[in-house]
Amino acid sequence: PHSIRSELELLARYPLQQRSSIMAGMEAMAKKRISQQTFDETVRENVDDFEMEKDEALADAIQQFKSQGVDLTNIDTSGTDRSAERDELANALEVIKTAKDALHDGKPIAAEECITAMAALRSACAGGPKTELDADPTVADESTPAPARAGPGVTTNKSIIAMAKGPDSLAAFLPFVALAPAALDTLCAVCEDSVENRDSFPSIAIAVLAKLLDASMADADTVRRCCTTIAVLTTRTEDLKAMFVKKEVGGLRQLLTALKTHGADPLVVIAACQALRSVCSFDDLRRDFSGAYDASRAAVELGTIPELITAFRAFPDNGEVICALCSAMKVMACNDDAVQQIQAGGGVPIIIKCLEDFPDSAPVCQRAAAVVRNLSGNDDVKTTLCQGNCLPLLLAATQSHMEDAALAEHVMASLAAMALRRPTNCERIVALNGIRQITLCMRRFPKVAAVQRACCLTVRNLVGRCPELMDPLLGENMEELLRAAGKVPGSVDAAYAALRDLKLEATMVTMNADGQIQVGVEEFGARKSAFNPVYDDGDANIEDKMSAAAQSPAELGYNM
């Protein structure tokens, strides 16, 4: 077998086909990619053969490749000479791959050499993710805006590691006590913000990781590392989620045990909540189906909600822990039974208190509003939230953090749920100047489909059973805002429905399967089906034609 270095050299000759980042509702698409060596040689050719300045040569190379449909996200286009760095990375990958093969064959390995090689991988990925060795863990949430992307050198290094199947080699180190801590930190560094590396981590290894978590439950540091690694690996990777939550793997039970055993350690609580949120979220849009709902139900049945409520009470003043707990509680509130559990355990007042105690913290308000959004799916709970202190706190949060689109979305979606089939709640929303907040959110985020859709649904639910609220809504120039929302992909149907319920003229224009524009939506049965229930070939002479067209093997050129 050829070495890691030779694999990297082959990239200069063959384009790599990979799936690009997935936008919501879109399938993965293969894109052409090139190696760093190919890009650097093109720049050098521009300088040497065409006598271009370096900046001009770089711009010309970038333009050439983009015009050919090449994805340059894995390429360092800064023009910096990183050959020494890439040689060091190639050597480290070679060491790790060799050690993995040796372990597979039952041969001894040099642990210190492997630890040094893993440190080199973390160094190559520095500037992107934070690991246990490099920094304290941070709180992540699917509603949080994505952090700034790592520099081009880091992105390129992660792509090289993925091509060499680095995570697959690192997974072989997990069962070994001397190598496991460094392997966990390296996996975090390599796989954070890199779907290619997460995809190259073998699914069966996530079961090994769950077993390591179980075996190390007495060690808070190892538990924290395991939970952080689980959160990173299962983010937007449905295969790893599905394996981790299997009953025979017992991943959810291990996370619950971690919360029970180390409930007084804030870093463990944060890491365990991150892992819970990750494995119970549908965020891998490359897949049509997800097991997130079943995973959430399973976690609720195990008794996760009471442990989360206990943790809320243990850290009332720690905003970072509160953020993590709200993120986990949100995915637990997946159905009416879970919401009732939260209410019975005293979780509803706790979430409201988070809004009261942290009004100046946008992350806390955002995550607490996300929990309120899910809790409002229950009719009794949403009335309690609307008629109590929760509603004014939500409206105040949108006013205090005007630039937070995710917060605005969660608050508006909560209002939409509260107003649904509850005239008293509608009156309460209007009395607290809710209409003004709806219009402000629509104006602040005119191109954010999720915010526009939530606002349109709120308007529709307000007037659904309270037609007397039409005039106050129209008085705030709602018609203009709704027509603008109707031009934003993702909120067209909601805007159309809101305009219709406000008794305003609205027409939905659609494109049919033939590419023709039509007014309105075609109703089922409006077009006659082309299905023929009785097979009829329509040609009585078909057998004669088949006989005439038949040829012997000799006629077809076969030697008989």
Image: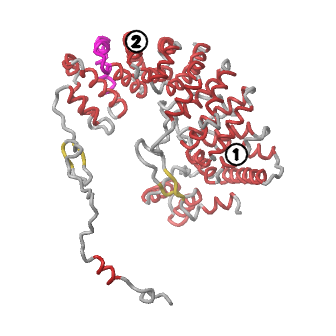
Residue 431 in magenta stretch: yes
The residue sitting at 73% across, 41% down in the picture is 174
Tell me if residue 207 can be seen. Answer: yes
Task: Name the magenta segment's main secondary structure.
Answer: helix
Tell me which label, 2 or 1, sits earlier in the chain: 1
Q: CA distance from mark 2 to mark 1?
A: 50 Å
On screen, 166 above or below 471?
Answer: below
Q: Residues within 10 Å of mark 2 (few under 14, many from 20)?
A: some
Q: Residue at x 63, y 26 (%)?
A: 256
Point out the frontmost of discs 2 and 1.
Answer: 2
Q: Is residue 405 left or right of residue 434?
A: right
Disc 2 designates what residue? Answer: 384
Range covered by the magenta-colored residues: 419-442
Disc 2, disc 1: CB below 8 Å? no
Is 536 a magenta residue? no
Along the line of sight, the residue nearer the viewer: 407 or 306:
306
- Quick check: 377 above or below 30? above
Mark 1: give few (<14), some (14-19) or many (20+) Cα within 10 Å: many
Three-letter amino acid code at disc 2? Thr
- Measuring from the top left, give residue 533's x and y in whole percent: 27, 57
Quadrant of the image occupied by residue 4 = bottom right
Visible in this render: residue 358? Answer: no
Label 1 secondary element: helix
The amino acid beneath tag 1 is Leu
Q: Quadrant of the N terminus?
A: bottom right
As drawn, is 101 to the left or to the right of 12?
Answer: right
- Image quarter of residue 317: top right
Q: Where's residue 441, x and y in %?
A: 34, 25
